[in-house]
Image (cartoon, rainbow, N blue to C red):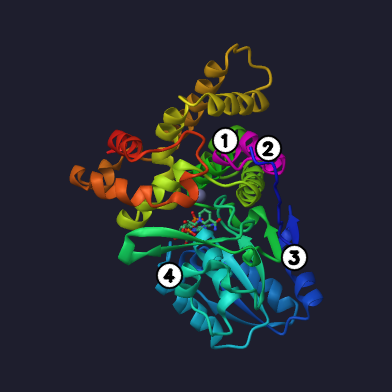
Amino acid sequence: MLKQYALKLPGKVFCGENALEKIKDILAAEGAQHVAVITDKGIRAAGLTDLVLTQIESAGVRYTVFDEVPVEPTYQQAQTLVDQCGSVQTDLLIAVGGGSVMDAGKLASMLVLGTLTVKDLLETPGKAKKQVKTIMVPTTAGTGAEATPNAIVAVPEKELKVGIVNENMIADYVVLDAAMIKKLPRKIAAATGIDALAHAVECFTSNKANPLSDAFALPALKMILNNIEAACDDPEAIEQKQSMQLASFYAGVAITASGTTAVHALSYPLGGKYHIAHGVSNAILLVPVMRFNLKDEAFCARLAEAHDACYPANTLASCSEKACALIDRMDEIVRHLDIPTCLREFNVPESDLETLVEAGMQVTRLLVNNMRPVTAEDAREIYRQIL
Ligand SMILES: NC(=O)c1ccc[n+]([C@@H]2O[C@H](COP(=O)([O-])OP(=O)(O)OC[C@H]3O[C@@H](n4cnc5c(N)ncnc54)[C@H](O)[C@@H]3O)[C@@H](O)[C@H]2O)c1
Ligand SMILES: [Zn+2]
């Protein structure tokens, strides 16, 4: 656990029933004249962008909508969005979408006035300062991107996804309204919910874990374990969906204070090379990596601590029983939600094993957070299990 730690939070978070109405107050407080609304076609077709536009219209503020953010954009595609936003004079950016849209919006907030590019930030992430304030309105639950200083882009020439981290990218405002995730299709709710689960458990068991990150990671984990199935299965389970939305935000805060570990590290090449959705690749790796980590005593003790916090009435005696029970519960969730558990469905040939190992081992930014050191041989064994 870190001896020194810090946490930067979004400026203001609005949460709960009709939280979207607060957008009017934000626009007034900021004296906004012309806002850029960043979103994607799927969210627009689901009628969610309109819910935000109604608020902007009733505030009497002009807006321009940019709805062409692709799923899990490359850095070149993120640059296109930056350039589009730069073509109009806006004084506030509102990102309405999942992690893909929010990350693209964060990059735009740093680069919209020109001079630097997304490629520059890939090379020197700390180089830029925020140029335009942001409001994040997540529509998945989720990446927690509304809370983090990270923007993840695909780098096609490396067949990898790369996280750009700059604390200036933390949102100025976050609006969590369950109306945005009410009709989230089950498949997307399942994958993005597992992503939040991975954030919570990885941040709690990370070498960077600390009291501040624990304060968010543990309640996030508990909320997810108690609500994820109902939130995904039952369209009317609005309370459970609200809990998932809050949990994914908490898990995002935990990322900001701590950091994810080998699940996310080894998952990056699966997104970068085979375009497997971020939540799905994490779901495939979550249980195998947790089982690999079990051999580390300190990890086992932390997972047992998480188990006790989430299931205080349990009567299990040893750390290893508790840690195993928590991993079994995660396995049960992944299976219940019908998320693929191996790479066969994505036509990943066995002959790609070495390329995967090489790419996964490059994600040192996150591998260093893993309590049990991961060697290339370990990564090979984990990938072999999921082929
Ligand atoms: N910045 C961070 O801290 C962070 C953390 C984790 C993941 N990420 C990144 O976020 C991206 C993934 O984001 P995501 O998992 O939220 O998915 P996404 O943003 O890629 O969206 C996936 C699909 O879901 C659709 N969709 C989203 N919300 C919907 C809704 N309410 N109703 C109907 N359709 C909806 C979108 O239109 C899209 O087609 C990846 O690039 C990942 O690397 C970032
Ligand atoms: Zn993630």
| Picture coordinates of residue 62, whole percent (x, y) | 67, 84
105 sits to left or right of 290: right
Q: Amino acid at mark 4?
A: Tyr
Of residue 179 and residue 102, the one placed in the foreground of this image is: 102
Q: Secondary structure at mark 1?
A: loop
Check disc 4 and report the residue beneath it. Answer: 75
| Residue found at x 26% / y 50% | 355
Marks 2/1: CA–CA distance: 14 Å
- Quadrant in which the N terminus appears: top right
For marks 2 and 4 on the same chain, the one whose residue lies earlier in the sequence: 4
| Disc 3 crowd, CA 10 A, few/some/many (<14, 14-19, 20+) | some
Q: Which mark is residue 21?
A: 3
Q: Amino acid at mark 2?
A: Pro
Q: Which mark is residue 302?
A: none
Check disc 1 and report the residue beneath it. Answer: 205
Check disc 2 and report the residue beneath it. Answer: 219
Of residue 204 and residue 219, the one placed in the foreground of this image is: 204
Q: Amino acid at mark 1?
A: Thr
| Disc 2 crowd, CA 10 A, few/some/many (<14, 14-19, 20+) | some
Marks 3/4: CA–CA distance: 33 Å
What span is colored magenta in the figure?
Answer: 201-223
Contact check, label 2 and label 1, Cβ < 8 Å:
no
- Quadrant in which the C terminus appears: top left
Q: Is residue 4 above or below residue 42?
A: above
For marks 3 and 4 on the same chain, the one whose residue lies earlier in the sequence: 3
Answer whether residue 186 is visible to the viewer in this image: no
For marks 2 and 1 on the same chain, the one whose residue lies earlier in the sequence: 1
